[in-house]
Image (cartoon, coloured by chain):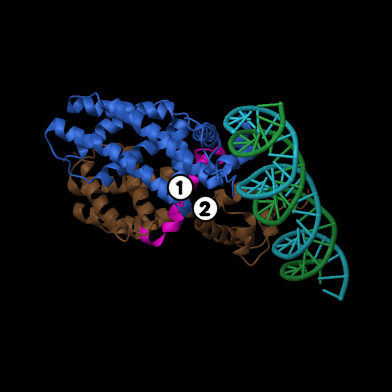
Chain colours: A brown, B blue, C cyan, D green
Amino acid sequence: MTSSPVRARRSPADKFEDRRRELADAALLTLAELGYARTSLRTIAENTSFSHGVLHYYFRDKVELITYCVQRYKVACVQRYDAVVSGADTADGLAAACGEGLAATLREDAVLHRLWYDLRAQALFEPAFRADVAEIDDSLQAMIWRVVTGYAELGGRAPTVTSAFAYALFDGLFGQALARHLDGAQDAADDLRTGAQDLLPRLFV
Amino acid sequence: MTSSPVRARRSPADKFEDRRRELADAALLTLAELGYARTSLRTIAENTSFSHGVLHYYFRDKVELITYCVQRYKVACVQRYDAVVSGADTADGLAAACGEGLAATLREDAVLHRLWYDLRAQALFEPAFRADVAEIDDSLQAMIWRVVTGYAELGGRAPTVTSAFAYALFDGLFGQALARHLDGAQDAADDLRTGAQDLLPRLFV
DNA sequence: CGAGGTTCTGGACGACTGTCAAGGAAATCG
DNA sequence: CGATTTCCTTGACAGTCGTCCAGAACCTCG
């Protein structure tokens, strides 16, 4: 009972948490590459400089590891997107930045978004994932809603949809673009960009 | 070389195909219950009156079985939906039937649609599924497009979106409603109904 | 240096997977 | 009826999986 490794830190700047993050980032790469169903703890460990046993030293089980990974993914994703759309000062400029931001993250982080859609589907079956997936979904919905309200203020009109409705539409658009992009369609990102620009005004009629 | 069971039928009305369908339907139930990642061939066989070996008598491997299942799912899904929306003779009536049809299939076939979103996510990783998933996606897109063009004719206006764009939006709406419904939200189906009715006119501005 | 805690290794365990083959059971047909 | 094809069961195979653990390695501090 002395060496339960879950909570026994002492060193400065929490080396324990640092290694957790390091392992989670490696796991994130492997998960994004193979998908949830095909990723084993041993495969994750192979993409690190450690052996497979260490994962159970830093994470209670596979669910805790994946949960931790997914939370890391969220903050990086939302932060980057907010930065992209924060610079616009006209309605049309914001719509363009919105489309460009979505297209950019589609091009650059396609495999991570693929993992997101995978895990969200898994959460439909595995209740252990639902809380974290719902939390990320909420933060993505809020991210989209910031764009919509920003567009509203710059354009002087109020949106005629709910936050959830707007997010569902953008999510559908993004999911389709992702599938096409991963299938090799060169124009997927461009279509997403123009599609998002097209969609935004339709939320105000 | 005489007894390769893949093609060696003779009896009337193809008993072989009948049993394939029977096994595939049982597999579909099990897959919808557990999801792709957690469903094994033995578990599928347990939900039938046969032993696990018979699956390899009627299907070459797991991929062929699941592929066959998914194709069965498609025809049932699209046929039923088309019947629901075929009766409308006004634009508003068609929008209502569209929303009601989506809400009804959400309520009645939630677990099957859950499987669909699961398999579509798997196809992002596993190229073996992509062709079949793309085919189903196309048929669903055509199904939505029939509603849109029908609405256009009844309303005397032409849609201002592409078929793929319209499908992406409806799919996003449905996916979100499905997640909420499976999470126990009582109003998910109603929101989907009104959401679809709300979305349809926005494709004509 | 040595004691004691922390970190990591590598092997083992039992359970489970898809696949296959040998042979029994059942149906079909000459 | 017996022979032959079709259908199905059973058990095995070689892997992989998550998990756990004994102990080596490492680090820190007295």
The crowding category of the residue bearing disc 2, from other C-alpha atoms within 10 Å (few below 14, some 14 to 19, many at least 20), is many
Q: Which mark is residue A35?
A: 2
Residue A14 seen: no
Q: What residue is rendered at 58% in x and 62% in y?
A: A22
Q: What residue is rendered at 46% in x and 34% in y?
A: B112
Membership of B85 in magenta stretch: no
> Where is residue B181 drawn, in percent x and y?
44, 31
The residues tagged by marks 2 and 1 sit, at their Cα atoms, a distance apart of 9 Å
The crowding category of the residue bearing disc 1, from other C-alpha atoms within 10 Å (few below 14, some 14 to 19, many at least 20), is many
> Where is residue B33 drawn, in percent x and y?
54, 34
Residue receiving disc 1? B121
Residue B14 seen: yes
- Which residue is most to the left? B156
Q: What residue is rendered at 44% in x and 31% in y?
A: B110
Work out whether B156 lies above or below A188: above
Q: Is residue B149 left or right of residue A76?
A: left
Do pointers 2 and 1 mark residues of a single chain?
no
